[in-house]
């Protein structure tokens, strides 16, 4: 029987549809919410530099590999890995890579949806004019009130989950393509408007220098609980983890999108384009936020609330701020939504393929589970925020984020690199990428086989203290 070369879940309508969907997956809370606050927590420029390096030499090569595996397998990540392992005569254990990804996606979505809920809440807050003329203190207290109230958080979390699930249940293609095509560019324009505002705060240069002049002391020495400086390499792991998180790598999201990609599309070119757009959005968000931080005497290291405590100040003081502000949060919620979809698609595709679920029931069950787990994240900001509810000084939310972004995703990425670089035949890679053994192929292959896996292993060993520089 000739091999079926199309996924049973359908195909993208073409190269652009894939670029849009993958960009929709990559660009999300990671860029606009997480990147600025972890940059602030880890000292700025040097952290950004490490992050950019991770994107270039680890993220992009692994992204190419992940899309390539997806398109070759044409199934959900679990079945793709099972099938490719068989085809390449590799161990059956490779299918667990798919499994780990399904679990990681599930865990990430549980807290992702809670934060996305904050963005939804802010649409209405901003529209109501609550921030008009507000001071930094006023803006901060509106945020504190929101996260102190588990019921409100639960309501917004639920709303976001339901919207996401409805789209996933209908199949990824309907709606997503059109939405990304128009809303992403609008988000981009609003970010530019915000950067324009930041330029007029009088502290733009300070923001730029915070983001782009590397201060390695600030990266490697962090204050502990008692305010004493401690040498640590953890920020490097966080930068690496974020490179995976922001590009949606290491758990099969990009693999499953790759499986809907028609043959003949250049995987390398599209991956570079997607990574570049993703990085640009993150840097713009940083450029918009840090000048506001400095102009208002705020703390760059104030944590997950950073964008909610800074951007409303800008909206409160610009002409038509309520309008731009609510539009911004609509677009942020939308960007989160197009990312969330890719977090549960691998699990849904697998239930449909292997257990005969309809898309609707697969989505409902997984959605119910994620929604329930999300309650743990909600409580992390209020009734479980105390030290008696923490483990290693981290709340439930911090732990989930750490486990997924800094451990599971880099580990998944490492295994993807090892499989594509060492288990798959070189000719199979060339065939799937559709290129010959030229400079580009060799450069990618070298990065994938040697540089990315070794770098991930070094950062890991270093972070757990087995290797110290
Ligand atoms: N990349 C998205 C963001 O930056 C989040 C995301 C979507 C993701 N799908 C993923 C992260 C898969 C890791 C794996 O917001």
Image (tube, rainbow, N blue to C red):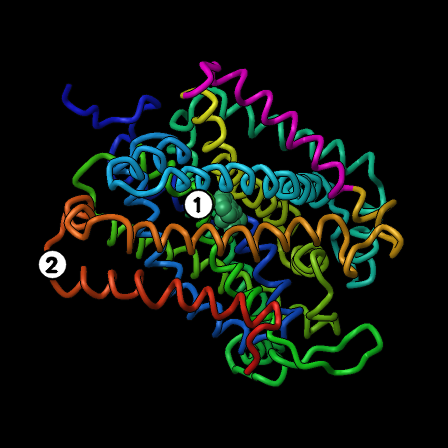
Asked if the beta carbon under badge 1 is closer than 8 A to the nearest atom of ligand 1, the reply is no
Answer above or below: position of 110 versus 274: above
Answer above or below: position of 297 versus 84: below
Considering the whole magenta stretch, tell me its main secondary structure.
helix
Q: Residues within 10 Å of mark 1 (few under 14, many from 20)?
A: some
Q: Name the residue at 45% across, 14% down.
A: 356
Q: Give the image quarter of residue 252.
A: top left
Give, as a single range, the part of the protein colored magenta. Answer: 354-378
Q: Name the residue at 74% across, 70% down.
A: 298
Q: Nearer the viewer, residue 319 or 255?
A: 255
Secondary structure of the residue carrying tag 2 is: loop
Q: Give the image quarter of residue 114.
A: top right
The quarter in which the N terminus is drawn is: top left
Q: Position of 298 compared to 358: left or right?
A: right
Q: Position of 88 compared to 351: left or right?
A: left
Q: Position of 465 compared to 31: left or right?
A: right
> Which numbered mark, 2 or 1, is in the foreground of this view?
2
Residue 144 spot, x, y in % from top left: 82, 52
Residue 24 spot, x, y in % from top left: 44, 43
Residue 192 can be seen in this image: no
Q: Position of 255 compared to 167: left or right?
A: left
What residue is shown with label 1?
A: 184
What residue is shown with label 2?
A: 437
- Residue 361 is covered by the magenta coloring: yes
Q: Name the residue at 65% across, 28% down.
A: 369
């Amino acid at each position: 029987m000739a091999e079926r070369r199309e996924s049973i879940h359908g195909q993208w309508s073409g190269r652009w549809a894939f670029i849009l969907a993958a960009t929709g997956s990559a660009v999300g809370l990671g860029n606009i919410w997480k990147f600025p606050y972890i940059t602030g927590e880890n000292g700025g420029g040097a952290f950004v530099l490490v992050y950019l390096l991770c994107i270039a030499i680890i993220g992009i090569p692994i992204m190419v590999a992940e899309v390539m595996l997806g398109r070759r397998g044409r199934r959900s990540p679990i079945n793709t890995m099972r099938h490719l392992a068989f085809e390449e005569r590799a161990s059956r254990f490779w299918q667990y890579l798919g499994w780990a990804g399904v679990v990681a996606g599930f865990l990430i979505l549980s807290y992702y949806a809670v934060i996305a809920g904050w963005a939804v809440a802010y649409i209405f807050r901003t529209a109501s004019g609550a921030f008009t003329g507000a001071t930094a203190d006023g803006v901060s207290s509106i945020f504190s009130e929101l996260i102190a109230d588990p019921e409100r958080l639960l309501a917004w979390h639920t709303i976001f989950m339901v919207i996401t699930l409805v789209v996933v249940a209908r199949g990824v293609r309907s709606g997503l393509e059109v939405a990304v095509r128009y809303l992403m560019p609008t988000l981009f324009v609003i970010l530019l408007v915000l950067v324009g505002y930041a330029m007029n705060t009088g502290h733009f240069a300070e923001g730029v220098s915070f983001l782009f002049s590397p201060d390695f002391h600030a990266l490697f020495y962090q204050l502990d609980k008692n305010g004493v400086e401690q040498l640590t390499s953890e920020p490097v792991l966080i930068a690496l983890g974020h490179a995976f998180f922001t590009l949606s790598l290491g758990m099969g999201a990009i693999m499953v999108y790759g499986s809907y990609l028609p043959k003949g599309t250049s995987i390398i070119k599209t991956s570079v384009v997607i990574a570049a757009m993703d990085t640009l959005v993150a840097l713009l968000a940083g450029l918009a936020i840090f000048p506001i931080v400095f102009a208002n005497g705020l703390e760059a290291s104030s944590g997950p609330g950073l964008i909610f405590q800074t951007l409303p100040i800008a909206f409160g003081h610009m002409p038509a701020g309520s309008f731009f502000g609510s539009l911004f949060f609509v677009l942020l919620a939308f960007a989160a939504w197009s990312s969330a979809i890719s977090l549960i698609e691998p699990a849904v595709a697998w239930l449909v393929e292997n257990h005969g679920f309809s898309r609707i029931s697969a989505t409902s069950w997984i959605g119910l589970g994620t929604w329930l787990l999300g309650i743990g994240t909600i409580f992390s900001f209020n009734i479980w925020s105390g030290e008696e509810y923490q483990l290693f000084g981290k709340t439930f939310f911090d732990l989930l984020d750490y486990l997924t972004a800094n451990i599971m995703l880099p580990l998944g990425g490492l295994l993807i690199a090892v499989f594509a670089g060492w288990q798959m035949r070189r000719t199979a890679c060339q065939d799937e990428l559709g290129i010959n053994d030229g400079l580009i192929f060799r450069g990618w292959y070298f990065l994938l086989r040697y540089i990315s896996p070794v770098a991930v292993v070094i950062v890991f060993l270093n972070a757990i203290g087995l290797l110290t520089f």
